[in-house]
Image (spheres, grey):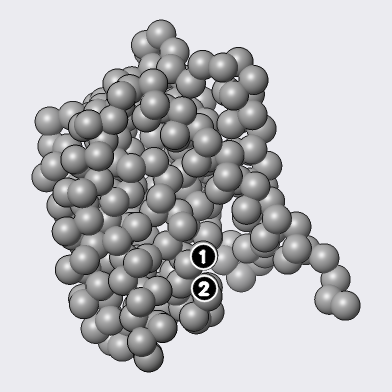
Amino acid sequence: MDGAFWTVAVAAAMLVGMGKGGVPVVGMLAVPLMALVMSPVTAAGLLLPVYVVSDLFGLYAYRHAFDRRVLAIMLPGAVVGIWIGWRTAAAVPETMVTLLVGVIGLAFALNLLIRRSAVTTPRRPEVVPGVFWGAVTGFTSFVSHAGAPPYQVYTLPLGMSRTVFAGTSTIAFAVINAVKLVPYYALGQLSPGNLKVAALLAIPAALAVFVGVALVNRMPERLFFRLVTWALLLISIRLVWSGGAGLLPPP
């Protein structure tokens, strides 16, 4: 844990915090960034407590701005998806899940960009699609912390305001991350050493939550959703690249 480690770790923690403050998709960059200095699996276990602590501040910031129906539909499916991820952790290659998530997110982001409109007329969330995408979100979040693309496939077309969209996302992933603590602990990814480092990283992450909230509140709505769409596109391209490379036979 030298200077390079702490530089990368603090930057990753701030990305987590800004994501919990509502800045689109930046939290997904934290694990890939940490993977520059440590194993991705170790990075995922190290950062999960940082996500959870940041969630507490995000919950406070968006306690009045969220869509109850979206949460009521998606979260039961997400819990099922986490359970499936736990039970199949040894059988499903992480690279396959990464590739699948990337393909879904890439197709959806390209569709939004081609139509040239990421903001739609508000519409009522439907139950069956919401439960399905909730389960996919929970599963992919458990396996590779990549729950944002499937989550956005369901929520972006609903036409929520940027504040309600950010708040609903923050609350949904706060619940998902809290539930993930149980299987992560059972799989041995929450070691005492990791928890000590996570406690230190929680400080810059918590401060960055309010930076994220300020950015969301000052950002024009159309720009916000365009940023969400482009972030989804870029993250999905990276996931496709990483997943595809992982499935190739070694040279």
Q: How crowded is mark 1: few (under 14 residues within 10 Å), some or many (20 or more)?
A: some
The quarter of the displayed image where residue 194 is located: bottom left
Tag 2: residue type? Ala
Q: Residue at label 2?
A: 35
3D distance between C-alphas at marks 2 and 1: 5 Å
Q: What element carries label 2?
A: loop
The quarter of the displayed image where residue 219 is located: top left
From the top left corner, tell me how far across and down residue 131 is, in percent: 46, 32
**182 to 199, vertically: above or below:** above
* Pick the front one: 5 or 164: 5
Q: Is residue 14 left or right of residue 240?
A: left
Residue 32, disc: 1
**188 to 243, vertically: above or below:** below
- Screen quadrant of the C terminus: bottom right
Residue 219, disc: none
From the top left corner, tell me how far across and down residue 236 is, in percent: 60, 45
Q: Residue at x 40, y 74 (%)?
A: 8
* Pick the front one: 200 or 51: 200
Q: In this view, does 70 lie to the left or right of 33?
A: left
Tag 2–tag 1 contact (CB < 8 Å) = yes
**56 to 62, vertically: above or below:** below
Residue 54 visible at all: no
Q: Is mark 1 on a helix, strand or loop?
A: helix
Tag 1: residue type? Pro
Q: Residue at x 25, y 39 (%)?
A: 215
Farthest right residue? Answer: 251
**192 to 220, vertically: above or below:** below
From the top left corner, tell me how far across and down residue 107 is, in percent: 66, 32
Q: Which residue is drawn at 29% across and 61% down?
A: 14
- Screen quadrant of the N terminus: bottom left
Q: Residues within 10 Å of mark 2 (few under 14, many from 20)?
A: some
